[in-house]
Image (cartoon, grey):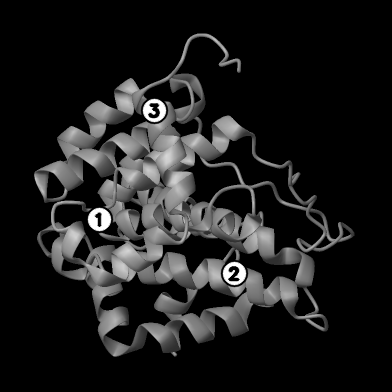
Amino acid sequence: MDYQITNSLSPTNPDGSVDQRYSDSTRRLIEKLGTDGVNAIDALRNGQLALAKKHGWVGPLIVDFFYEEAERIDRTEDHPHRWKSKKYLKDLQHILELNGFTSSQATKLIKSKQFRLRLDRESFSGKRLKVTVVKQLEFCNSYGVSGQYELSLMNEEGLRKAMKLSKINQSLLTIRELEEIKRDHPRRNKKEQDKPIDIPVVPDDTPSLTEIVIEGTTEPTQYDLAKELVAIASLIETKDGWKDPELIEILSQEANQLMSLAHIAMEPVTQPITI
């Protein structure tokens, strides 16, 4: 195993030396990269910026591996450094930069991964309609890293707007268009967005990552459900729906409820009806 590539892909100790506790993880990563991946990293690390587009594919691969490996470390009961999974992730930004990615590129790679993981978790949380989150995740995955990064900085309304405009245009939005939506619908305020990624390091005697406080599972309100329904309805193609037997069969299962909701939307009453 090449000494230089091993060092460049390994977490380090505070003094800058290689943290040998992750040698097995580094070996597994290099095996996953293969010869093509190692050569691509060498090209990027040696400053061959003209080849960045050609070799940039190794960035997402490394990021995916680090998150998968952190989870594996955390879930392996007999792993000697099980609680070190957060430390492993903390070194990811530095390792990406060490291997030829700029600070901005490394940040986008990590933030886009975190965004996809958040959507994936939400699809199983029960707090939001799964079909909506799955649609959002599919939409996110249709973009490259830069597009995913811009989407990650939008709030829910901005994400719905991006999906709706993309459907109307019948094509993906440009990065510039995504940036404009993000400015109008930021997920957090600018001060928070500018903060560097901060993944806290836990001491050796800290419990495992599995001891994470589970988010509340408060039942969604009528208004929450209505918003989800509107978001879903905007994504369903109705042009030729009248001759789509499968679509008709699915919708007919709740035909009365759908008619009632449509009546509320189109002909709302201002006074209660009395008999």
Exactly how many numbered labels are in the figure?
3
Q: Check the image and name the residue furthest to the top.
A: 271
- Mark 3 packing: few (<14 Cα in 10 Å), some, or many (20+)? few
Task: Identify the element where label 3 is drawn.
Answer: helix
Q: In this figure, which residue is indicated by the disc labeled 3? A: 265
The three-letter amino acid code for the residue at tag 1 is: Tyr
Measure the alpha-carbon separation of dots 3 and 2: 62 Å
> Along the horizontal axis of the image, is 127 left or right of 48?
right
The label on residue 18 is 2
The first of marks 3 and 2 along the sequence is 2
The label on residue 160 is none
Q: Of circles 3 and 2, which is in front?
A: 3
- Mark 2 packing: few (<14 Cα in 10 Å), some, or many (20+)? some
Q: Of circles 1 and 2, which is in front?
A: 1
The first of marks 1 and 2 along the sequence is 2
Task: Identify the element where label 1 is drawn.
Answer: loop
